[in-house]
Structures are given as structure tokens and as C-alpha cells.
Amino acid sequence: MIPRIYIPGDSGALALGAEKVAKAVRAELAERGIEAKIVRNGSRGAYFLEPMVEVATATGRVAYGPVKPSDVKSLFDCGFLTGGHHKRWLGAPDKIPFLARQTRLTFARCGVTDPLSLDHYKAHGGLKGLQNAVAITPADIVKQVTESGLRGRGGAGFPTGIKWKTVLDTSADRKYIVCNADEGDSGTFADRMIMEGDPFVLIEGMAIAGIATGATKGFIYIRSEYPHAVAVMQKAVEIARKVGVLGVNVLGSPNSFDMEVRVGAGAYVCGEETALLDSLEGKRGQVRAKPPLPAHKGLFGKPTVINNVISLASVPVIMDKGAAFYKDFGTGRSRGTIPIQIAGNVKYPGLYEAAFGMTLGEIVDDIGGGTATGRPVKAVQVGGPLGAYFPRALFDTPFDYEAFAAKDGLIGHAGIVVFDDSADMLKQARFAMEFCAIESCGKCTPCRIGSTRGVEVLDRLAQNVEPEKQIALVTDLCNTMKFGSLCALGGFTPYPVMSALNHFPDDFRPTPVAEAAE
Ligand SMILES: Cc1cc2nc3c(=O)[nH]c(=O)nc-3n(C[C@H](O)[C@H](O)[C@H](O)COP(=O)(O)O)c2cc1C
Ligand code: SF4
């Protein structure tokens, strides 16, 4: 049997030099006259070990990482094709502590299989959920998804089954499934990773959503900054169509479902579901007032399910193993698993899928290993640019929608960005206001005007101009934005601002210039 070498081809690994490593491996194989198959798999998500090269040996896969092109010659010398020892040797990938401790339901195949091999997908449990779905009624599919407790992973945490039921119960000549792959939150990459590493799971989830609700057409709206994900998804859709996973008779059933990939417009607000629909319709991406809900009048005025990539990609395992299996993981009303993305100033960055309920401290200190700089952790922003900053004092908060809301925070898309003690939280608060000012769609006044005024107030505070007055003003402004904005961009910008102010008040009392000089 010819040796099989796995070299990740996803954007994360490519950014860390995987292409150069692949080139070096190819050159070395040619020079030594060795025939081998190179598989460009997705990443397993341990980015501190990427590029992580794996070889299939008689006793299972053996990993090496992080591999540099200059390591390749010595890897061959050490017999890495049969798992030989080398300074980059990591052993069996599923025994690497960062990976071994995870509960991989949604990301089970990511980094393991060849992303564009449907045979590989099926050999690793793929399409079982869809097979089960075509054998039961739409109402029973919706019931399973509802009972699983799955909530939207895009940010709002809305129960997926209830959304699907609304679309199922709304009659129309045409309905749509829209996958939100705009992934604009800072420190998040789960959507990209799964689209590049296991695209068929998203296609399967969307097909199940279509059959469950009576929608026959789907769109995946991928942000323009993700060219690799766009290319992989396009190829995967073509493959799925060719073999009848998509088309007029999904898996030979009477159900029809097909989909297209669309590229986003490069604005954060186009991730907001109604702005996304406008953008998909070819208009400027601007938030629509609700009602009507997209489930009643969505894309082109038709009932539309709009779900995040991870919400949809979590459905196949639910339909395969059952609602009870999925629901068994998690805590409180946060059921199942969540792919936590650990980023920023952290020693072990990566994607960590686990059941809800780990504490923030466990995630940052144990899994993430603290800061990369070795300095104390000062703050962690959870949930993207609209998420609150959590100080160490709140590290006992369990990763759970309600627990975070109770501490004036949000889980969002489960991205966490770590900051060490050199971070200036006044600057971070200003950044939040500035981000909102730049990304505001301009439809409502509290967000459009408020964010610009917010930057000005925080600038005056940084210059120590009447600090108490500025703090009162920014607090009042945040309340206006929170309660008066049409969507969460303006409505949640106060979270990072007020959490920075409340948890790190010293950073908001800059030393007067004269005092500092003394
Ligand atoms: C400003 C803004 C940006 C958003 N960006 C995204 C995004 O990039 N991806 C996403 O899935 N949801 C995003 N959302 C949430 C969506 O509006 C919506 O809740 C989500 O697509 C619903 O899918 P889910 O129920 O599966 O989470 C954003 C919301 C707002 C207000
Ligand atoms: S809050 Fe901001 S982004 Fe949202 S609708 Fe209003 S102006 Fe647009």
C-alpha cells in the first residue's frame, strides 16, 4: 500500500506555512523516488501545532508538528512514513491532550478526512442523518431538532427547531434555507474551519433543513475574505449534486433540494440576518425592521430559515444519533457541544469543541494555557466585537448562554480573545465604539450617531477632560444605544464598553498629564 501523508490545506494551516511544507514533502518524495499519496485535509484545530503533518501507519495515524519546510528532509531520514521518531513527533493525534479532551460531535471528521471525498465522508458516518431524515415526516425531523435542544450558534442562541417549525407551518410556493457564513466576529473561525475541512456536513445539514421545512433551495452566504472556503464549498456542492445528495431526488427520495454558494459584500452588518438577505437579493446590506420575521417573509419575501454554519452542521449528528444523545451533553438550557475558538494573546490557540458548562477559567488557563506572552491574563472578550470583557474575577462563569447573560455578557459565536495585563481597556472601549461607527448600516440614530459621539466622549476621557462628566455621558449614551437600536450592532456595542468601564475602572481614570510628569 502506498503511504498516505496528510497535510492540512485549510486557511489557518496555509497561513502558518502548510503550502511550503507540502511543496518540500513533494520534492523530497520525488528525490527519493518514493510514491505516496498526499491528502490535503482540514485542520484538527490545534493551531499551535500547525502545520501538523500526519502519516497513516499500520498502527494508526502519527502526527508531527509544527513542521517547517526545513524539517522535511530529516523527517524522511527518521522514517516518518512509518511513524519514526523526530523532534516534531507528536504521536497519535487523538492522544494529543488538546484534542483528546474534546467532545467532537460537529467537528468529528474535521482534520481526519479528505474534505472533498464523499466516500471518506460516508466511511466516517456521513449521510446517515440525511438517510434517517428522508425516511420520516418533516414534522418528525423538526421534532427531533427541537428536542435536541440545539440553539443557534450564530450569536442569538435562538432554538433551531422552533425556527424550523415556523417555516414548516408557513405555506408558500417557495421556501429557502440560507446559511449564514459571514463569520465576522473577532477571534472566530469555526465556520471557516468546517467549510474547508468537512464541507459535506454543512451540505447534509442544509438538505435536512430543506426537507424538514419544505424548502427546495438553499444559499450559503460566505464572507468574501474566505476564498478557500468558497472554493471548497463550490466543489463540494458540485460533487453532492453529481451523486444525488442534492437535486430533484435527494438520496433517491421524492424530496428536492439544491443549493448555491454566494460571496458576501465585506461588511460586518451583512452577518445580521436581514441585512444578509438584502445583500443576497443584490441590494445594499441594510437591516430590515422586524416583523415580519424571515421565517414568514425572508429571502425574496418567501419563508426562510436562516441559520449559522455550525447550527446547520450540528444537525446531521442529531439526526444520526438522535435528539436524546445530543441533549445528553451540556448544562441547563445550553445543550450539546459548542466549538469554542480560543484566540488572541494565548499560548494554545485553536478550536476546542466541548459540551457546554466548562468554566471560562478552565478554557483560558487549562486549555488555552494562559497568555502567549507569559504575562497575567487581564481580560477575555467573549462573543466577538459586541461581547463583554470578562475579568479574572468572573472566570468561574460556566460557558452557557444564561450564565453569561446573567453576568452581562454573551457567548455569541463562541470566540474568545485573551488579553494580558498590558491591555488598555479604555482603548478597547474606544475601539468598540469606533468599530460600531465604521460598521453601522446607518438605519437608526442611536447606532449611527451614538457610536461617533461615543468615540468623541472616550477621546475626551483619555485626555482627562472632565472625566466624571465623560463617564456619566458614556453611560447614558450606552443606555440609549442598548435600548434604542434596531439591531444588535448598536444594541450590543455597550457591552464591551460598559464591561471595560465597570471591571477595569482604573483604566478610565488616566493619570493627569501634570501628575504623570511629577
Ligand atoms: C451585526 C450582526 C452581525 C452578525 N453576524 C453574524 C455572522 O457573521 N454569522 C452568523 O451566523 N450570525 C451573525 N449574526 C446573527 C444573525 O443575525 C442571526 O441571528 C443568525 O444568522 C441566526 O442563525 P442561528 O439561529 O443559527 O444562530 C449577526 C448579528 C448581528 C446583529
Ligand atoms: S443598530 Fe446600527 S447596524 Fe443595526 S440597524 Fe441600527 S444603524 Fe443599522
Image (tube, grey):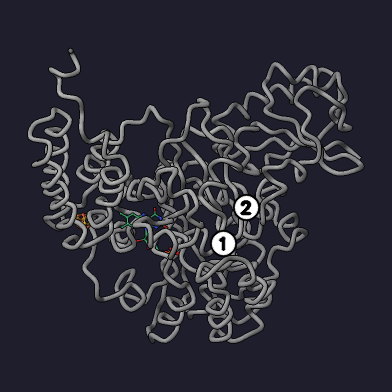
Q: Quadrant of the N terminus?
A: top right
Residue at 44% across, 43% down: 392
Instruction: Residue 408 in the image: state x and y as whole percent.
Output: 34, 57
Label 2 element class: loop
Between residue 374 and residue 48, name the one nearer to us.
374
Residue furthest top in the image:
518
In the picture shown, does residue 479 fall above or below 197?
below
Instruction: Residue 158 in the image: state x and y as whole percent.
Output: 42, 70
Tags 2 and 1 touching, CB below 8 Å: yes
As shown in the figure, which amino acid type bears the numbered disc 2? Asp
Q: Which mark is residue 198?
A: 2
Instruction: Residue 220 in the image: state x and y as whole percent.
Output: 46, 58
Mark 1 neighbour density, 10 Å: few (under 14) some (14–19) many (20 or more): many
Report whether 449 appears left or right of 88: left
Quadrant in which residue 295 is drawn: bottom left
- The residue labelled by disc 1 is 313
Residue at 70% across, 29% down: 65
Quadrant in which residue 86 is drawn: top right
As shown in the figure, which amino acid type bears the numbered disc 1? Ala
